[in-house]
Image: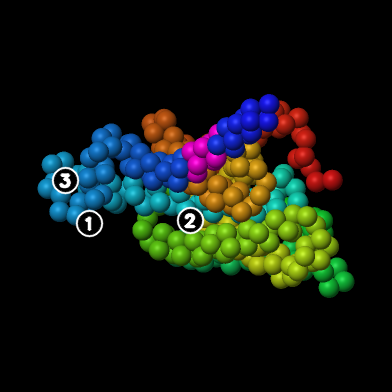
Amino acid sequence: MYESSTKKSRISISSFCNKKNLLAAVLIISPPLAFFFSLTIGRYDYIPFRTVVDVVLSRYFDIEPYWDPIYDIVVFRLRIPRALLAMLIGAGLSVSGASFQGIFRNPLVSPHILGVATGSAFGGLFAMILFNHPSLDLLFAIIFGFVALILAHLMSRVRGGTPILMLVLAGVVVNAFFSAMIALVTYTADPLYELPEVVFWLMGSLADASYEKLDVVTVPILVCIFVLYLLRWRINLLSLGDEDAQALGVRVERVKWLIITCVTVIVALCVSVSGVIGWVGLALPHIARMLVGPDHRVLIPTSISLGAVYLVIMDDIARTLTPAEIPLGILTAIIGAIIFGYLLKRTQGRGWVDS
C-alpha cells in the first residue's frame, strides 16, 4: 500500500517536472522561431524558411548565395528591423503589465494606467504637427511620457507617501487631460496632409520600423526589462502589501518608484516608435499567470517570451491579412479584448480584483 502511494507520488512529481521543462523549452524556442517565421512572409513574396535562415547566416558564415539578390534587401532592410521592433515592444509592454499588476496588486492594471502612453502620444503628435521631424517626434514622446508620470506623482503625494489608490486616480486624471490635448491637436491638424498621418499613428503601427529607431530604443528598453527581471522577487513581496513588504526588508517607496520609472521608460519609448498599442500589457500577463502561476520569478520571464511572440505574430497578420495594412493597435485591441473576455469568463472573475 505504502509502496503504491510512493510510486504514484513519484510519477506525479516526474510528470510535473516534465511539463515544467517542456513549457520552459517552448518559451525559449518560440521567440526565435516566431522571428524567422516573420521573415518568410510579407507583401513582396513568400520566402522559404530555410532560405531565410541561410540569408541571415550568410552575413556571418561563408554560404554561397543561391537565392534571388532581392531577398537580401527584403529580409535585411524591411523585415528584420520590423520583426525585432515588434518583439522588443511586445516583450517590454508585457513585462511592464506583469510588473504593474504585481505592485498595484490588481490584475486589471495595464502599463498605461498612469497616463504615460497618452502623454507620449500627445508629445509625438505635438512634434509631428509643429516640427515634422522623426527625431523630434521620438524626443517629445519620451519627454511628455515623463511629464505625465511627474504630474501623476505630484497629484498623488499624500503626507510624504504615495498611496496606490491615489496614484491610480491621478493616472486617470492625467489620462483624461492628455486625451483631451490629443483631441485638440487632431482637431487643429490639416485635414489633407497631416490628419491621415496623425490618425494612423494614433492607431499604432510598425510600418515605419527602421534600424535608426531600433538604435534609439533597444538599449534603454532592454536595460529596463533587465532591471524588472532583477526586481522580480521584490515584486512578489510588494504584491503582499506595502506594510508586509516593508516588514520583510523592502524599501517600499524606493523599489516602487524604480519599477514605475522602468515601466515609464519602456512605455514612452514604445509609443514613440510605434504609436499607442494597447492590450498587450493587460492580456498577456494573464496568459502567463495561467501557465506558470503568480510567482514573478517565473512570471516575468514568461511574460517577456509571450509578449515578444504575440506582437510579432500580430504584426505579421496586420501586414499580410488584407491588401491595405491594418493598424497594429486596432488588431491588438480586437484580439486582446477577445482573449481578456475569454479569461474573464473562464475564471468567473475569481481573484481578478484586489480585495
Q: Residues within 10 Å of mark 1 (few under 14, many from 20)?
A: few
Mark seen at residue 119: none
Identify the residue under disc 2.
273
Q: Residues within 10 Å of mark 3 (few under 14, many from 20)?
A: few
Q: CA distance from mark 2 to mark 3?
A: 29 Å
Residue 171 appears at what percent x and percent y?
74, 56
Q: Residues within 10 Å of mark 2 (few under 14, many from 20)?
A: many
- Residue type indicated by callout 1: Tyr
Location of the C terminus (image quadrant): top right
Side (left or right) of 104 relative to 33:
right
Q: Secondary structure at mark 3?
A: loop
Labels 3 and 1: the sequence-earlier one: 1
Look at discs 2 and 1 and give the one toward the viewer.
1
Q: What residue appears at the point 55 percent right and 34 percent down from the top-left corner?
A: 15
Q: How many marks?
A: 3
Would you say residue 264 is visible in this rendering? no
Q: Nearer the viewer, residue 242 or 136?
A: 242
Identify the residue under disc 3.
69
Would you say residue 273 is visible in this rendering? yes
Instruction: Report which quarter residue 2 is drawn in.
Output: top right
- Residue type indicated by callout 2: Val
Labels 2 and 1: the sequence-earlier one: 1
Q: CA distance from mark 2 to mark 1?
A: 29 Å
The span picked out in magenta is 15-24
